[in-house]
Image (cartoon, rainbow, N blue to C red):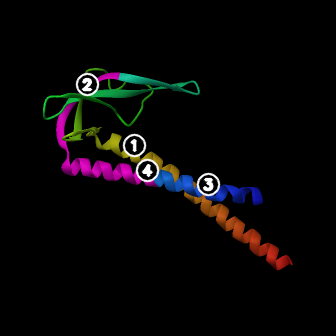
Amino acid sequence: MDTLLCCFPVLALIGIGFVGAADRHRRHLRALRRDGTRTTGWVTGHDENTHQGRTTFVPVVTYRDTFGVEHQFRMKTAADSTNPPVGTEVPVLFVPGRPESADADNALTQQAAYRTPLIIGVVLLGITAVLGIAAIIDFVSRIEVH
């Protein structure tokens, strides 16, 4: 049990970090929808990532801002194939003057990008709670024996 207790704060901090990241991304999306400018972008390529023998593709989107300057960003979700294909139109939201704020204006893609870390964070916090309860029960049982 003592070995598990050392993991307790680490799991809690990691869980809090994931929940915080999800909340930060959700607030970013809300601000984009409220203050952002809509435009149309196009999928111009895919970044290929291979991890543990599995290859995923992240669409790269190119769009023009209100000044006609071209910018690129990587969509927040990856796929097992090159979908959407190159040339596909993508609705884009961005804050003028802040090209790094750009994101695909797709509710499903946006929700997936913040729900995944939220779920991971909640699961880790749940495990932390179970470990905490187990530690308390163990502590109480040791007191009653002595």
Magenta stretch: includes residue 43: yes
Could you say which is closer to the camera, residue 22 or residue 89? 22
Label 2, label 1: how far apart the Cα atoms are: 20 Å
Residue depicted at 70% across the width and 70% down the height? 136
Q: Nearer the viewer, mark 2 or mark 1?
A: 1
Residue depicted at 79% across the width and 73% down the height? 141
Query: Pointer 3: residues within 10 angstroms few (<14), some, or many (20+)?
Result: few
Q: Which mark is residue 10?
A: 3
**Which region shows up in magenta?**
20-45
Q: Which mark is residue 21?
A: 4
User: Is residue 93 rendered to the left or right of residue 129?
Assistant: left
Amino acid at circle 3 = Val
Amino acid at circle 4 = Ala
Pointers 4 and 2 in contact (CB under 8 A)?
A: no
User: Is residue 89 rendered to the left or right of residue 68?
Assistant: right
Q: Which residue is mark 2?
A: 88
Precedes in sequence: disc 3 or disc 2: 3
Could you say which is closer to the camera, residue 60 or residue 116? 60
Q: Nearer the viewer, mark 3 or mark 2?
A: 3
Pointers 2 and 1 in contact (CB under 8 A)?
A: no
Q: Which mark is residue 113?
A: 1
